[in-house]
Every structure is written in C-alpha cells, then in structure tokens.
Image (cartoon, helix red, strand yellow):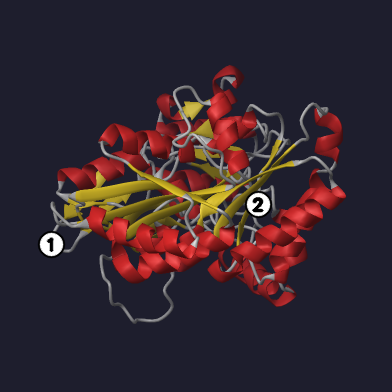
C-alpha cells in the first residue's frame, strides 16, 4: 500500500466514517495525556467497534508499514498511550469496544471488551450480586484494556491482587492482524506457556488486548473504615502485620499517607477536612470488609487498634460511622495526586520495595533528597500491603518551576538508586511507557532486557506496535 491517503481510504472501508478521526481539532484529546505531561502528533485516530475490525486495522497498518499506538481511557501517568512527534503514527482507540459479553456467576467470571470503563465493569459485577475488586482513582474513565496493558494495581491489591491476578483469559490481536482467542475461563490449564501473561503489562508493545475473562468475587455486605494517626512508616508496617494476623483477608485496604500529602489535599480539594484537631506525621486509612452482613468488623478493628495504641504504633484514630464519613476519608486519599498538581510541577515516582523495607527506604530517600535538593516537598503515599509507594516530589515553597524541572532527572536517579538498594522496582503499577524507558534500560539487568527484546522481536518483528514504549 502506498500513500497515507490510500491507507485512510482502506481504514474507512473497515470502520466507516464514524470510526475515523481526521480533524486535528477533534484529535486533540487523543494526542496528550490528562496531565498534559506528554504530547504527540498522529496521522489519524481510528476507532474500531469489534475485534474483527481491530484485526483488519492492524493488518492494514502492518502491510503499510505504519506504526500503531493502542489507547484506552488515556488516564496513564507514563505517556504509554501517546504517539510520538512524527505525525506518522496511527492512534488505535478501543473506546467503542464496550460490550460486556458474558457473566457466568457459577464460574465467578465476567467476559468484557477492552473499552469497558472500569466503573461500568464494577457495576455489572454488582448487578450479578458479585464484586470486581480492582479499584483506583481513575475508575470512572480508565478502561479494562488499559488496566490490563499496565497490570493496574489500586487500593485492594493486598486482598485481591493486581490485574494479572484477576485475569483468567484474553483475546488479543497480534501485530500481523491474526486474532489469538485465549478467552478461557479456566483456573487450571497446564497446556504449556501461559501466553496471557506476555500481554498483561506489555503496554500494547506485543499486541492489542481486545477482550478478557476476569474473576469475580462474592459481594461485600459489611465494611468498617478507620483513619489512624501514626508516628512513622515503621509503625505502619507493625500495624499492618497486627491487623493481618487479627483479620486475615478481611483487611482489604491499608493506605499510608505522609502529612505533606494530606496538607496538599486540605489546601486544594474542596470539602476535605482534617479528621483530627492535631497534626500528625503519618496516617493510614484502614478498611475491613466481609461477605457477611453483620460481621464483627468494628470489634476486630477496635481490638487491633487497642493493642496498637498500647504498643505506641497508633497516636489517634477515628472510625467512620456513616457512608458519608467513609467517602470523606477516601476522598482525602484519592485527592492526593490531583492536589499535588496545584503546587506546580509534580515529579511522580511509582516504586515498590518489600513491605519490610518501606521504613528504611523512606528514611534513606528523604535524607538524601533533602541533602541534595534542600526544601523539596516530599509527597509519599501508597499501598503499604503490597510495598507500593507513590514517592512524589514538589518544588520548594516559593521557588520557580524551571530550576526544579531541570533537576527532574537527578531527583529521579537518586530515588531509583535508593529503590535499587532495597531490591525494589522503579515501576509498581503505572508501567514504563515513555517516561521510564531510559531508566528501565539503566536499572534492569542486561539479561532481563535481552529476554524482553527477544519476545518483542518474536511477536513484533517489524516493530510497529507502540514503538518507543517500554523498550
């Protein structure tokens, strides 16, 4: 196939006029991320409505030698779904693929297409009397395909696992346009390599996920939520161990936040108020849940917190007494990322270390950052139960943006160096995208990179699937 105009004509025959976006003004929302941190240009945006249409689009682009950038809800933080500056790439948006294909309550599974918004998936599960447990701040706009492509985590990982743990089967369009139908709702299948795991977390670089069979869980009928003040991250590690021993799987949320994180929310997010009159250095949001409507969760929480107070792990606590109070406490936690953007440029780092190492990581990283970059404000928060910290940096109060932005690489390097000292990961749940590509090359072992490149070469020898991302 010769020119781009010939490709456009061929694509229009597949997806119709409504499935193409050619007007630069209408393309805008597909070409930059929600934070405006990444911007690109594209030849066009194509929006197929079915797996067969995706396959035809991929085949046409493959034959024309045109690179594809798969995109879901475009809520990512690492630029993984944004095209480059060439204006030659095609953005393939899956947002029209919104069918819930099947709900199988007896098998505890749901089969959905890649464009289904996470919140709609949660609602479909609830209608079937079940729970789909993945939950994160962008759930009103992120899509299942993006959640799979980045192996999304969120706030309930310590109980239910991340997207990889929630997936039984996939349907994937390969880089040459062939369709792999791996939509098997099996919990046991030992017939060779488990191919779905190649595509989960691959950020669209090995193929395009078009549908998935996902696990469902029993619906939750009782919940207890508490906001607890702590003296240190070490106290958080002690407290989560205590609560796990006492509550087992009923512990579904354990979110750590520094005082700086909470201050930004109180300053910038309307309606949020401090649960305590006094200021404390650290906080955790604890959530217990159970399938029983009258589970003794309040008593369990009281027992755990009582012994934590005696041990000096907890300084103060408030237990939510209504759904409105639960929502208010979660609003503080969920408001951090947005609130930090009001303080100027925000350097986001999504690291993980073993849970036991969180206190030492925070101590070492805080100390070295303040020595090297005096006055920077550290916004540390995250999911203690899985070792994932969002360790974000804002500029010193009253300083200019430009010198702070100029230090971004050095700040990132310092944080990643400390992460590596604790055998951690430089990306826990956001992915690599374009933001961390060079860092991944620097921090991952050469053999790991070699194996990743071998997989990429085997599946996408022409390198047309989301080029410049991950590798």
| Residue 205 in view, yes or no | no
Give the image location of residue 161, x and y in percent.
40, 62
Give the image location of residue 288, x and y in percent.
30, 55
- At mark 2, the secondary structure is loop
Upstream in sequence: badge 2 or badge 1: 1
Q: Nearer the viewer, residue 408 or 240?
A: 240
- For label 1, the crowd category at 10 Å Cα-Cα, with few meaning under 14, some 14 to 19 and many 20 or more, is few
* 349 lies above or below 273: below
Q: Residue 106 got which mark?
A: 1
- At mark 1, the secondary structure is loop
Q: Residue 469 got which mark?
A: 2
| Residue 296 in view, yes or no | yes
Q: Residue at x 30, y 56 (%)?
A: 302
Q: Residue pushed farthest front? A: 310
* 156 lies above or below 124: below
* 86 lies above or below 100: above
Q: Residue at x 17, y 50 (%)?
A: 221
Q: Nearer the viewer, residue 303 or 219?
A: 303
Q: Nearer the viewer, residue 455 or 407?
A: 407
């Amino acid at each position: 196939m010769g020119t781009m105009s010939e490709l456009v004509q061929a694509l229009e025959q597949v997806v119709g006029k409504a499935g193409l976006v050619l007007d630069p003004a209408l393309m805008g929302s597909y070409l930059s991320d929600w934070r405006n941190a990444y911007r690109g240009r594209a030849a066009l945006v194509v929006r197929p409505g079915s797996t067969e249409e995706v396959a035809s689009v991929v085949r046409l682009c493959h034959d024309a030698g045109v690179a594809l950038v798969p995109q879901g809800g475009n809520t990512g933080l690492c630029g993984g779904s944004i095209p480059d500056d060439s204006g030659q790439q095609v953005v393939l948006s899956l947002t029209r693929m919104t069918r819930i294909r099947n709900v199988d309550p007896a098998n505890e599974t749901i089969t959905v297409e890649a464009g289904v918004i996470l919140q709609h998936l949660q609602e479909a599960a609830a209608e079937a009397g079940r729970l789909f447990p993945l939950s994160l701040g962008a759930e009103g706009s992120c899509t299942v395909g993006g959640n799979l492509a980045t192996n999304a985590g969120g706030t309930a990982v310590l109980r239910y696992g991340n997207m990889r743990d929630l997936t039984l089967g996939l349907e994937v369009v390969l880089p040459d346009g062939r369709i792999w139908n791996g939509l098997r709702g099996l919990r046991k299948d030992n017939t060779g390599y488990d191919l779905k795991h190649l595509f989960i977390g691959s950020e669209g670089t090995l193929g395009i996920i078009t549908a998935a069979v996902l696990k469902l869980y029993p619906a939750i009928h009782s919940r207890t939520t508490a906001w607890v003040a702590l003296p240190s991250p070490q106290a958080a590690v002690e407290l989560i161990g205590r609560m796990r021993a006492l509550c087992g799987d009923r512990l579904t949320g354990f979110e750590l936040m520094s005082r700086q994180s909470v201050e930004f929310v109180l300053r910038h997010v309307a309606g949020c108020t401090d649960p305590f009159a006094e200021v404390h250095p650290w906080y955790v949001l604890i959530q217990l849940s159970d399938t029983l409507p009258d589970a003794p969760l309040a008593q369990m929480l009281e027992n755990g917190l009582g012994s934590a107070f005696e041990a000096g792990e907890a300084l103060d606590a408030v237990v939510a007494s209504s759904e409105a109070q639960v929502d208010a406490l979660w609003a503080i936690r969920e408001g951090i990322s947005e609130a930090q953007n009001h303080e100027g440029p925000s350097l986001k780092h999504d690291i993980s270390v073993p849970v036991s190492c969180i206190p030492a990581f925070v101590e070492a990283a805080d100390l070295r950052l303040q020595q090297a970059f005096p006055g920077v404000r550290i916004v540390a928060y995250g999911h203690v139960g899985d070792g994932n910290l969002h360790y974000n940096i804002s500029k010193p109060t009253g300083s200019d943006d430009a010198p702070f932005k100029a230090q971004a690489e050095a700040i990132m390097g310092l944080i990643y160096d400390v992460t590596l000292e604790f055998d951690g990961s430089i990306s826990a749940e956001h992915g690599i995208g374009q933001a961390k590509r060079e860092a991944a090359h620097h921090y991952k072992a050469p053999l790991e990179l070699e194996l990743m490149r071998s997989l990429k070469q085997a599946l996408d020898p022409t390198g047309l699937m989301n080029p410049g991302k991950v590798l």
